[in-house]
Image: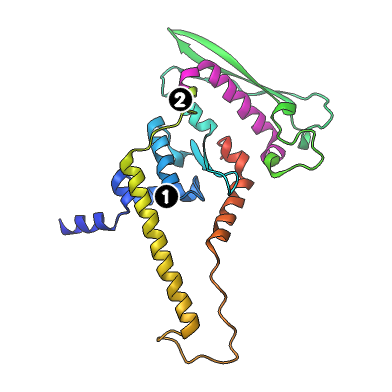
Amino acid sequence: MSQSLAKQTEASRLALATGMSDDRINLVAQLVAPGANRLELANFLAFCVARGLDPLAKQAYFIRYDRNSPGSIVVGIDGERATADSTGEYAGSDEPHFEYEKIATPPPKGGPTYCKVTVYRIVQGQKVSAVGEARWVEEYPDYGKEQPTNQGAQYRRRPWNQLAVRAESRALRKLFPRQMGQLTAPAQTPRAWAEAAEEDERARYSAESVSRNARMYDRIFGSDDDEPPVVDAEPLPPPAPREETESELLDQVEADRQRREEGVK
């Protein structure tokens, strides 16, 4: 009994509020929601639970496109397929059909300029279909620009995959409009989750502040456990500011933005 209470005490407030383990919450934060603060993470988890999505299965992502902007919740193609399958009426899809037209700025690697994907659904015992289409000139973010940006990175790396994902997504939206529409609607975060996340965030900043002040004190006055200072020794480097750590995370997210947005593994 005492061991169980000890484990509960060690768990984060968000883990206790959601009933999820801290291991799972931390994995979500690291793998699919890098750069999210605790409240954003709680909102993301609430969205996934409400929609029946598993973020660790790459069905949804939290992405911050710009450090000065709020993050966005993006449902990948795997999440759309899972949502369609949850109806019990999803009947799969055909392989993508590609075409290669001559355009002013062709795709790299000899990639396609057009793709269509046919998706199937069982409606009242009948198999019906819908076709989704995607064109390079409409989908590629940097089409027509002399200097491409990072926004089109995944299109340049995976032109076939990116067009196929766009086409399949459109077909799914035609066949499952209500279910796909729910994936873009916001989900309300339980108040207990939000309050727990805010408490965790305050506790984390408090702990960081204490640790940072202790390091600063040791640099200025020396630690009681240290050897007497050497005059010619190099000064200790200052601790990396938090902004740099977030920047590194955001740079990584931006580099993988298109892949994560489409649920590419």
The image shows residue 48 at horizontal and vertical percentages of: 42, 36
**Magenta residue span:** 154-179
Image height check: is 50 above or below 35?
Answer: above
Q: State the residue position of label 1.
A: 38
Amino acid carrying label 2: it is Gln
The image shows residue 33 at horizontal and vertical percentages of: 49, 46
Image height check: is 127 above or below 43?
Answer: above
- Quadrant in which the C terminus appears: top right
- The residue at the far left in this view is 1
Image height check: is 98 above or below 130?
Answer: below
Label 1 neighbourhood size at 10 Å, few (<14), some (14-19), many (20+)? many
Q: How many discs appear?
A: 2
Residue 197 colored in magenta in the image: no
Q: Nearer the viewer, residue 84 or 33?
A: 33
Q: Nearer the viewer, residue 40 or 22?
A: 40
In the drawing, does residue 50 fall left or right of residue 120? left
Q: State the residue position of label 2.
A: 182
The image shows residue 189 at horizontal and vertical percentages of: 37, 37
Amino acid carrying label 1: it is Arg
Q: How is the image coloured?
A: rainbow
Tell me the distance, in whole angstroms, between the alpha carbons under discs 1 and 2: 24 Å
The image shows residue 144 at horizontal and vertical percentages of: 80, 33
Residue 165 colored in magenta in the image: yes
Is most of the magenta stretch helix, strand or loop? helix
